[in-house]
Image: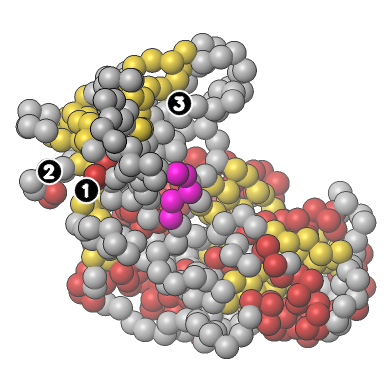
Amino acid sequence: MSDTYIIGAGIIKFGRHPDRTPFQLAAEASLLALDDAGLTIRDIDAIYAGSTFNSASMVAQRMLHLIGQTGAACVNVSNACAAGATAVRQAVLAVKSGEYDIVLAVGAEKNPKGLMGGPLAEGPPPEGLFGSYAPPSIFAEAGMVHAARYGTTIEQFAQVSVKNHHHGTLNPKAAYQLETPMEDVLASEMISWPLTKLMCSPNVDGAAAVIVVSEKKARELGLGRAVRIRGSALVSDPYEPRSPDMFDPNSVTRLGVGKAYAMAGLGPEDLDLVELHDCFATAELLHYENLGLCADGEAGRLIDSGDTELGGRIPVNVSGGLLAKGHPIGATGVANIVEIVEHLRGEAGARQVAGAKIGLAHVLGFAGVAACGVHILEKAG
Amino acid sequence: MATDYIVTPRAGHASIRVDAGGNAWIESYRCVDCSAVLSSRAMACRSCGSRTPMQTFRVAESGMVYSWTVVHRSYPGIAVPFVSAIVDLEGGPTLKGNLRIDDPDAVRQGVRVRLVFDDAGGAHDKDGAPYVGFHFVPEGTGA
């Protein structure tokens, strides 16, 4: 089976876009990706559109009503925070199948305001009666398991936010360009202990797109700025004895990452940069271990070492991550891939990871149940 | 019109069972093939996929805190702060619930707690039937 390549990538500035529809956001990101590739919408065989809150209204088709109704196959993908990665993954599979040569994957979201989620079942609303099901609480609880086992401190979790907000100041597409020193992170409003407001990713709107092509088409169009997809994995949460009352972000991530490393034939030591799902500051430390960036129990020491900062041994979330760039749910999984593409091309500007050849993008979709998407990309040209 | 019956309370949580006399307990399921314990009913075992009907059992009402958070901001209308605790019940499933404790800073993994049934915050269904809920208290303290 031949490889697939990304030959175009685009991302709009994340933030609140009150005057625009999610379809306009998707269209803008898609046009950026098409222009980047030197293609037009008429070249696109199929479209996979990731969106969690807007999928039911057929984002892909509504986008085509704005940029050209070509009759291309449209698939609208919803998979919580993994919707964007799922769209890319389906684009990869569609090209690998041989049916299509050029496929567009786009993620676009207009997020609702406030805390995500809420009751599904009849009966008294469980929040506050049977503990908390708000996402910050879920990820606080996941972090406290790590803290209990390894002695991880609130300062170590908070340092993730300090680092990623610093990275965000270098990314013009990030929703927030704001340095947040440790004392500011710790002093911001407590949401779910130990997570303060600055340790929670902000709900913003956004869109990002990539164009996935076959090896034959990539060679035709020129490999100069192309990026090879070495690994593409999508998994759902395996059985865990404590689930669903205790959400485990670890086993699902380890399952997905293991598949992606196996597919790519490489391991964490081969990575030059990582974009991982820092929906909350606690999550980033858990994923250091889940991705194999350090041994189990060493995540606190890894953040303390500075190795995951820009300029360090393995920079993580140099885009600013979800914490500073923002987290438009369905767009996030495509945006992470766009970030890796920019670095592998050497086009990431002030936040460029020098000499980056291989990068990994990870997202974790969660709605009481989970999905994990992992992509490993390599510079082709 | 006077009524001569007592309205049977309803379960306010998927794991609660209530008999006609209003007595409440926690029920869980054990796979006869792989011994996995499930806190809610499934159509086959979540762990092994076995479709052999699961054993139901009454769950012990004591256990240990596995993880927790102190919630300071929640959805609109939810009273804060409160402790959200994840408790491994003895021989049974893991359940999440509020932990009522005087000093939230004293919560640790391994703290022993007891499950106490309550009136689910005074909630009633649309016909006026009360709900039964539960919360946790530290072992050795009153309900």
Whether callout 2 and callout 3 share a subunit is answered yes
Q: Secondary structure at mark 3?
A: strand
Q: Secondary structure at mark 1?
A: strand
Give yes or no for contact between labels 2 and 3 (Cβ–Cβ under 8 Å). Answer: no
Give yes or no for contact between labels 2 and 1 (Cβ–Cβ under 8 Å). Answer: yes
- List the residue tagged with mark 3: B38
Q: Earlier in the sequence, mark 3 or mark 1?
A: 3
Distance from disc 2 to disc 3, alpha carbons, whole Å, reads 27 Å
Distance from disc 2 to disc 1, alpha carbons, whole Å, reads 8 Å
Whether callout 2 and callout 1 share a subunit is answered yes
Q: Amino acid at mark 1?
A: Val
Q: Is residue B2 left or right of residue A117?
A: left
**Residue extent of the magenta highlight:** A118-122
- Chain for mark 3? B
- The residue that appears at 56% across and 74% down in the rendered structure is A110
Distance from disc 3 to disc 1, alpha carbons, whole Å, reads 24 Å
Which one is nearer the viewer's eye here, B130 or A177?
Answer: B130
Q: Earlier in the sequence, mark 2 or mark 3?
A: 3
- Using the image, tell me which numbered label, if any, was put on residue B101: 2
- List the residue tagged with mark 1: B83
